[in-house]
Amino acid sequence: MNRPYNFSAGPAAIPVEVLNRAGSEIADWHGTGVGVMEMSHRGASFGDILATTTAAIRDVLSVPEDFDILFMQGGGLAQNAIVPMNLCGTAGAAKMDVAVTGSWSQKSRAEAQRYADVHVVFDGKPLNFQDVADPATWSIRSDTNYVHVCSNETIHGVEFASLPDLKALGCAAPLVVDCSSHIASRPIQWHRIGMAFAGAQKNLGPAGVTLVFVRRDLQEQAMGICPSAFHYKTVAANQSMFNTPPTYGIYMIGLVFEWLQAQGGIASIEARNIEKAELLYRTIDTSNFYSNAVAPAFRSRMNVPFLLADETLNDTFLNEAKAANLLSLKGHKSVGGMRASLYNAIPLAGVEALVDFMRHFERTH
Ligand SMILES: *Cc1c(COP(=O)(O)O)cnc(C)c1O
C-alpha cells in the first residue's frame, strides 16, 4: 500500500496503525460478531467503548475532574452558536468578548452576534493576522459572560503558546477556547479555561464528533432558547447520550487516544511536534525562496503557511510535490501560497521528506 504523506488541514491524516486496527475490527468488534457502526448506543459493548474512550481522553489530556467531557455533533462552527446559548443566559444582557486573531475567531464573532452583544477585545486584521497583542492590552469588559479565543488559527498559522490568564488580568469571566486544530498536540492549561471545544477531524479522528469540555459550575447559565441536544447540562447528565451520539467517530477517537498513550502521551508527542515544526520553519527562514510572516512567538506548530517568492511557481510546486508523495500542500484561498499541516499523525520522516523536497525544488527552480 502506498501511503504518501498527507499534509491536509482537515479532515486530516490518521495514524495508519489506527486505520488498520479499525479495519480489522470493522465487521466484528472484540468477538461480538457486530461492528461498532451497527451496535445500539445503549448496549454494553458501546457502553464499554464510551467509558474507555472518555477515560483515555481524561488521562492523556489531564482533564481535571471538575470538567465534563462531552461528545457532540455540529463541528466547531456549531459551537460558535452553542457556546453563547449555554453561557449567556444569566440575568442581565447576554455579552461575549472575543479576540479576533484569524479566520476562525472571526467566524465565532459573527455567529455569536446572533445571540449576544459582541465586543472585540483585540482585532488582528490590521496586522494581517500575523501577530497578537499582549492580552494585558485587550479591552475586556468586566461584565462579559465569557471571553473567546481560538488557540490555534488553522488558516493563518497563529498559535497561542500560552493562553491568556484572565484571572491575572482582573477578569472573572471564563475563557472559552476553540482548540480544534491543536488539541492533543501539547498540554492544555486547564486552570485558565472555563470551557473548550474541538472538532475531531484535525488531530483526533474522522469528522462528525465535536469534543467539548465544560466546567461543571458553568452548566447552570443557559439561555431558554438553547436546544436540548445542545444544552451542556442535559448532554452531560445523559453521558452524551441524550440523543444518539456519533458512535463510530467516538470509537475512532478512542483508538487515536490509545495510540497517543502508546506514543508516550502528550509529553512525547509535544517533543516530536516541536522538532517537526522547528525543522520546517528553519528551512523556510534560511531561504530567500520561501517565507512565513507570522511573528515567531505566535507561529503555529500544527499549521505552517508559507509563500513562494515567485508565486507563478505555485502550481509547479504542488504538482512536483504530489509526484514526490507529498499531498495537500495548497494554502487556504484566503491566504494563498502553501500550507503544511503537521498534525500528530505526520511523523518526523514526513517533514524531513517535505524539507528535502523544498530544498530540491529551490535548487531546480
Ligand atoms: C476546522 C476548524 C473549525 C471548523 O470545524 P467544523 O467541523 O467545520 O465546524 C473551527 N475552528 C477551528 C480552529 C478549525 O480549525
Image (spheres, rainbow, N blue to C red):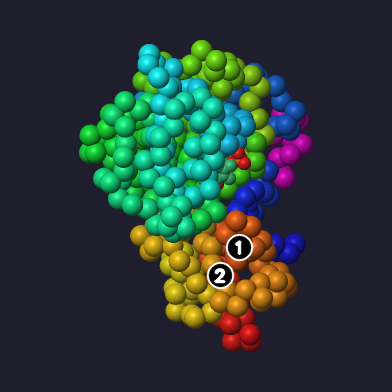
Please provide percent x and percent y for residue 27: 77, 36
Q: For the residue labelled by badge 2, is the local secondary structure a helix, a strand or a loop?
A: strand
**Rendered residue at 64%/19% (across/down):** 243
Reply above or below: 55 against 10. above
Quarter of the displayed picture in which ligand 1 can be seen: top right
296 sits left or right of 12 in the view: left
Look at the image and tell me whether residue 19 can be seen: yes
Give the percent coordinates (x, y) of residue 249.
Answer: 64, 36
Mark 2 residue type: Leu
SS of the residue at dot 1?
Answer: loop
Q: Is residue 230 left or right of residue 281?
A: right
The answer to whether 247 is drawn above or below residue 260 in the figure is above
Check if mark 1's residue and mark 2's residue have beta carbons within 8 Å.
Answer: yes
Q: Which residues are magenta?
A: 23-34
- The quadrant in which residue 253 appears is top right
Residue 336, numbered circle: 1
Instruction: Answer whether residue 69 is magenta in the image.
Output: no
| Quadrant the N terminus occupies | bottom right
Three-letter code, disc 1 = Gly
